[in-house]
Amino acid sequence: MTESERAAKVIDALKAAECEPAQIALPILNELVGLVQADREQPLEIEEARSSAFLAICEVGKALHRGTPTDGLWASAIAATERWMSLVR
């Protein structure tokens, strides 16, 4: 799977999970870990974008797990993933 395909799958999963309750969204987010991990070294800008996407996704997951509001967190995770995808096209 190409880097671009992985980023696209992450965006699709984030958008699908955003509309779901926490008990459904959390397993979806957990499955993204493998897609966001690097399988080979990339230029620094791509590595930073991927890391930002991963951290943003983790923030959503933490909020869902704790039952705290996710206001703005989904948008941040999607935006960070879109930036990653824009760099790997």
Image (cartoon, rainbow, N blue to C red):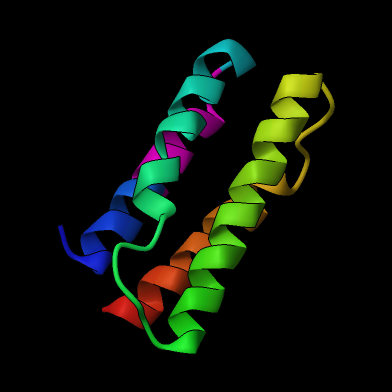
Find the magenta span and give its range: 11-20
Residue occupying the point 80% across, 19% down: 67
Residue furthest to the left: 1
When the figure is inspected, residue 6 is found, relative to residue 85, above or below; the finding is above
Residue occupying the point 66% across, 56% down: 76
Q: Position of residue 42 (x, y in %)?
A: 36, 81
- Inspect the magenta stretch and tell me whether residue 15 lies in it: yes
When the figure is inspected, residue 58 is found, relative to residue 7, above or below; the finding is above
Classify residue 14 as left or right of residue 5. right
Closer to the camera, 5 or 74? 5
When the figure is inspected, residue 27 is found, relative to residue 55, above or below; the finding is above
Quadrant where the N terminus is found in the figure = bottom left
Residue furthest to the top: 23
Classify residue 66 as left or right of residue 82. right
Quadrant where the C terminus is found in the figure = bottom left
Query: Can the viewer see residue 21 in this picture?
Result: yes
Closer to the camera, 19 or 8? 8
Residue 6 occupies quadrant: bottom left
- Inspect the magenta stretch and tell me whether residue 17 lies in it: yes
Query: Can the viewer see residue 79 in this picture?
Result: no
Q: Position of residue 12 (x, y in %)?
A: 35, 44
Residue occupying the point 45% across, 65% down: 82
Residue occupying the point 35% across, 49% down: 35
Residue 74 occupies quadrant: top right
Residue furthest to the right: 68
Residue 79 occupies quadrant: bottom right
